[in-house]
């Protein structure tokens, strides 16, 4: 949830929603300096690490660190601080102004890079290994700030776009840093000095840009720091586990890092042993992978209607598995040839399929990760959001270490690299299915997203009136069996529906509504106990600060007209007010659904029935949802609400 006070401190209120798309954020002070600070830091990290890796692999002869171990040692040293200090970093970020933390971290980066510059000039591997650890510490301190800052200065409808920009920028910076590091360190005579100068210069640029980041006040200034990293790590994990959707999303993100680490770690060997390419081919694979991640990250805002759309996560998981598995089939039968340069490699059609698989695999990984990050930011309590992110970083590090161990074990067991990719793609499908069964909201939002993008042309007007936090009651006309699914697609938050008990008997739809934890209601005369239980559950939803939706007509329309509203909504509002809860009521109107396959337009045996003629109105027909201004609970009357919904139907 966005912290309004902090957002106000960072930027004028009107600026917060002024941008038309995610790229416009780069023209705003609340985002642009932060973006370029993050960009410079990620580029410097990778320029330094890759230049050092090339140095110890090709230029230095170290008996105590053979070239085959260099990448592993550098990677392990960089990840170690995430395990040791993430918990402390999360506390510091919650306790202090985030902008001050960012500037402190950038000052630390300058000091580390000055030491690294001395190490490069002297070609001192011991000093540079120490700097790898210190840069890991630098990234550990910056990680919680990076993801806790965004929800403090962006509103809920900007989070997906903001995260997409940061994710894209990070991978572009990684790519540029690695390319620059490899090129600079290879310069004859002056390579080491050039790298030293570049590292210090990038650190200075990052610190200069950080000076322009506006204040982002502490969210929990009274927090007492626990300096014991082990007990605090355990406490952070328990804190994250307190919100089960958030915690399982952390596991989902960590799995994505596991998945990505398998591919990134195998690129050099894959290029050499399977594709028979040289170092330039290995670099090309990295470029293709990075570009795919960037494009996928940027697509998230477009595909999500500028809201946190976790329905994209299953889509991303499906794509990751499909193209990881196809990468196995595309690469397993390549004939053995002499080592190829870049030109020879790209001239062969079989290699284009390999590159397409890598590009699409990483694109879908971007679709998978960005909404998950945005969901965690949106659903975490602001007072301990940074500690939740710290828990995420700890889990990420553990999963990446696990990735190296499992990949090494598979190679040791005789697996080929394409077989490891196949194994990872299948494992991803299994893990994703398990996560989506544990957290049905992902699956439900995916179905809603697919329905509203590929079955109907779904246009939403006034969705800014749907509250991004706090309890509220949504009231809507009832036209078809899929009304609830379309409302899910329109809301950035989960909705609990009160629905006629008979709809739960409809094949497939009934199962979906049970997954969505919809509340069945029966007429009071038919089943008084079920009637009262439904209102008790509805009150509990509002008590927990969530969205509750009700169709006040009581049944799906049989003639396409708006039916009189019943008094159930008044019973809910009055019960809530009796407990001191004042939920606003949001009128909504679904349009153009009458006549669709799911509406009761067909006449069979003298009764109006639905789902009788598939595609009776063609495919991809236009439907809509109009959302009106909130009605204060004191002004709620069934007749007045009906008039408001009727008015929305006419707009």
Image: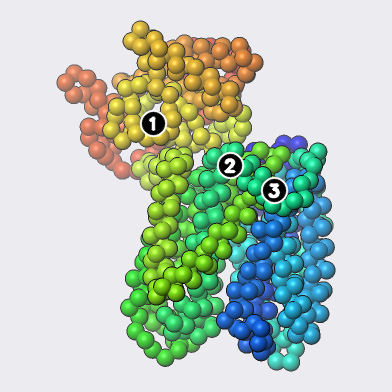
Residue at (48% x, 25% y) in the render = 549
Describe the element under mark 2 as helix, strand or loop: helix
Q: Would you name the residue on which mark 2 appears?
A: 241
Query: Is residue 647 at all visible to an observer of this figure?
Result: no
Reading the chain from its start, which is encountered first: label 3 or label 1?
3
Reading the chain from its start, which is encountered first: label 3 or label 2?
3
Residue at (59% x, 31% y) in the render = 467
Q: Would you name the residue on which mark 1 appears?
A: 514
Describe the element under mark 1 as helix, strand or loop: helix
Name the quadrant containing residue 129. bottom right
Q: Which mark is residue 228?
A: none
In the image, taking residue 560 as reference, residue 50 lies left or right, namely right
Q: Nearer the viewer, mark 3 or mark 2?
A: 3
Q: Nearer the viewer, residue 537 or 609?
A: 537
Asked whether disc 2 touches disc 1, contact meaning CB atoms under 8 Å apart, the reply is no
Residue at (41% x, 73% y) in the render = 413
Q: Nearer the viewer, residue 455 or 528?
A: 528
Residue at (53% x, 82% y) in the render = 280
Q: Nearer the viewer, residue 627 or 60?
A: 60
Q: Report how far apart the C-alphas of labels 2 and 1 lie in the structure.
A: 24 Å
């Amino acid at each position: 949830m966005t912290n309004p006070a902090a957002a106000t401190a960072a930027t004028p209120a009107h600026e917060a929603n002024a941008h038309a798309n995610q790229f416009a954020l780069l023209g705003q002070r609340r985002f642009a300096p932060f973006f370029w600070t993050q960009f410079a830091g990620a580029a410097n990290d990778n320029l330094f690490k890759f230049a050092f890796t090339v140095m110890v692999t090709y230029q230095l002869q170290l008996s105590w660190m053979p070239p085959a171990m260099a990448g592993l040692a550098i990677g392990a040293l960089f990840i170690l601080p995430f395990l040791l200090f993430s918990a402390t970093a999360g506390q510091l970020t919650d306790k202090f102004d985030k902008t001050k933390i960012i500037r402190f971290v950038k000052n630390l980066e300058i000091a580390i890079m000055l030491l690294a510059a001395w190490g490069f000039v002297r070609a001192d591997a011991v000093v540079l290994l120490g700097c790898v650890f210190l840069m890991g510490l630098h990234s550990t301190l910056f990680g919680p700030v990076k993801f806790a800052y965004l929800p403090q200065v962006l509103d809920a409808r900007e989070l997906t776009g903001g995260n997409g920009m940061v994710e894209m920028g990070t991978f572009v910076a990684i790519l540029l840093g690695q390319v620059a590091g490899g090129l600079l360190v290879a310069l004859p005579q002056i390579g080491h000095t050039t790298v030293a100068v570049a590292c210090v210069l990038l650190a200075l640029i990052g610190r200069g840009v950080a000076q322009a980041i506006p204040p982002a006040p502490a969210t929990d200034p009274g927090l007492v720091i626990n300096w014991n990293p082990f007990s605090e790590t355990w406490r952070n994990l328990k804190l994250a586990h307190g919100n089960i959707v958030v915690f399982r999303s952390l596991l989902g993100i960590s799995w994505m890092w596991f998945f990505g680490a398998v591919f990134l770690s195998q690129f050099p060997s894959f290029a050499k042993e399977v594709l028979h390419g040289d170092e330039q081919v290995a670099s090309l694979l990295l470029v293709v992978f990075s570009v795919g991640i960037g494009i996928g990250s940027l697509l998230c805002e477009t595909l999500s209607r500028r809201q946190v759309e976790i329905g994209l996560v299953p889509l991303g998981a499906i794509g990751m598995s499909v193209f990881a598995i196809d990468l196995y089939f595309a690469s397993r039968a390549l004939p053995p040839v002499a080592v190829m340069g870049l030109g020879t490699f790209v001239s062969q059609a079989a290699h284009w399929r390999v590159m397409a698989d890598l590009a699409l695999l990483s694109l879908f990984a971007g679709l998978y990760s960005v909404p998950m990050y945005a969901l965690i930011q949106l659903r975490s309590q602001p007072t301990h959001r940074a500690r939740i992110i710290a828990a995420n970083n700890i889990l990420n590090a553990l999963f990446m270490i696990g990735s190296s161990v499992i990949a090494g074990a598979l190679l040791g067991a005789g697996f080929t690299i394409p077989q490891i990719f196949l194994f990872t793609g299948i494992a991803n499908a299994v893990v994703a299915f398990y996560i989506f069964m544990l957290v049905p909201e992902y699956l439900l939002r995916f179905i809603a997203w697919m329905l509203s993008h590929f079955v109907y042309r779904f246009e939403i007007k006034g969705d800014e009136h749907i509250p991004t936090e706090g309890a509220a009651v949504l009231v809507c006309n009832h036209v078809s069996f899929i009304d609830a699914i379309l409302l899910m697609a329109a809301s950035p938050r989960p909705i609990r529906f009160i629905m006629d008990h008979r709809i739960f008997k409809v094949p497939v739809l009934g199962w979906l509504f049970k997954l969505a934890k919809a509340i069945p209601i029966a007429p009071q005369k038919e089943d008084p106990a079920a009637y009262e239980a439904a209102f008790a559950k509805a009150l509990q939803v509002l008590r927990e600060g969530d969205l509750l939706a009700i169709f006040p007509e009581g049944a799906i329309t049989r003639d396409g007209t708006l039916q009189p509203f019943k008094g159930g909504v008044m019973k809910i509002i009055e019960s809530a007010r009796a407990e001191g809860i004042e939920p606003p009521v949001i009128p909504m109107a679904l349009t153009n659904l009458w006549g669709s396959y799911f509406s009761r337009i067909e006449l069979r045996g003298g009764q109006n029935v639905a789902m009788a003629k598939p595609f009776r109105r063609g495919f991809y027909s236009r439907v809509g949802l109009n959302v009106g201004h909130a009605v204060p609970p004191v002004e709620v009357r069934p007749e007045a609400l009906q008039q408001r919904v009727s008015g929305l139907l006419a707009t």
